[in-house]
Amino acid sequence: MAGRSRQRWSGTRPMRARTGPRRGSSRAERPLWEMSPRELGALFPIVLAEYDPAWPERYATEAALIETALGPGTVTRISHIGSTAVPGMLAKPTIDILLEVYDDVDGTRLVRSLTEMGYHHTLHPERPPPHLMFMKGYTPRGFVGQAFHVHVRFHGDWPEFSFRDYLANHPVEAERYAALKRRLQARYRFDREAYTEGKTAFIKAVMARVQEDSTGDDDGEGRLPGPQLSN
């Protein structure tokens, strides 16, 4: 992922999806990026839902739309990650998609294409390159329709796959994770950052077990997760 790809991305500036007309908008409907974390927490509280069998189909439909919008030569792999990808798992009803792209991808075109699909995006320098996350379903009036998160990465072996598969194959651990989520939701309903941080120790413990199990393997899937892994 040479400097060529970094140069492509260096010209990418944050773009915002339209969430409603600006003229005549009330103060409560000002753009999301002008709101404080406290305001966003009140507008988008932590909501947990029992597993919905429709989630995989919604993922597949959205993934196909994304691939069509981006066209050939952009996507190396697209995957359903997060708790909605684990059968039977309690989850925030937001579908997480991992979008892996070629290292010479035209980032400006990618941002434009997803923005036209109704996504807005934020830059996350602390996450793996190209440091982008796209969101849909968030409006100044709260959640509208199915919410999606699209995490954009260059191609690689990412810990989200191992974590997802571990929970799918270890129902007792999945239930422990669900119980933790319920406790955190009761305590941090309006604080998304604290809710996410509260899951970190559990995630790291699971990934340590995955790493132990995969000792000697060369697939790289036993890596400990960084802060970008949040289900």
Image: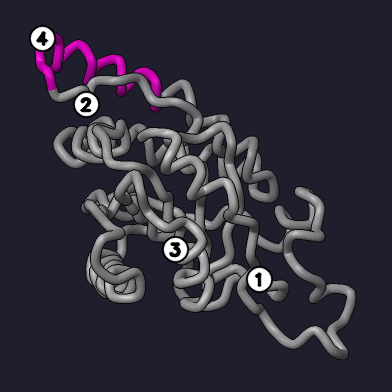
Relative depth, front residue between 179 and 195: 195
Q: Residue at x 26, y 35 (%)?
A: 156
Q: Residue at x 25, y 72 (%)?
A: 64
Q: Does residue 54 appear in this view? A: no
Q: Check disc 4 and report its element: helix, strand or loop.
A: loop
Quarter of the figure that contains the C terminus: top left
- Horizontal relation, residue 91 to residue 134: left or right: left
Q: Is residue 31 above or below residue 39?
A: below
Q: Is residue 37 above or below residue 34?
A: above
What secondary structure predominates along the stretch shown in magenta? helix
Q: Earlier in the sequence, mark 1 or mark 4?
A: 1
CB within 8 Å, label 2 to label 1: no
For the record, the magenta segment spans 203-218
Q: Residue at x 40, y 52 (%)?
A: 91
Please tell me whether mark 3 or mark 4 is closer to you in this view: 3
- Identify the residue position indicated by label 2 in the image: 221
Please tell me whether mark 1 or mark 3 is closer to you in this view: 3
- Identify the residue position indicated by label 3 in the image: 110
- Identify the residue position indicated by label 4 in the image: 216
Amino acid type for the residue under numbered disc 4: Gly
Amino acid type for the residue under numbered disc 2: Glu
Residue 112: image x %, image y %?
51, 70
Measure the alpha-carbon separation of dots 4 and 2. Answer: 11 Å
Q: Is residue 1 above or below residue 119?
A: above
Q: Residue at x 30, y 20 (%)?
A: 223
Measure the alpha-carbon separation of dots 2 and 3. Answer: 27 Å
Q: Earlier in the sequence, mark 2 or mark 3?
A: 3
Amino acid type for the residue under numbered disc 1: Gly
Measure the alpha-carbon separation of dots 1 and 3. Answer: 26 Å
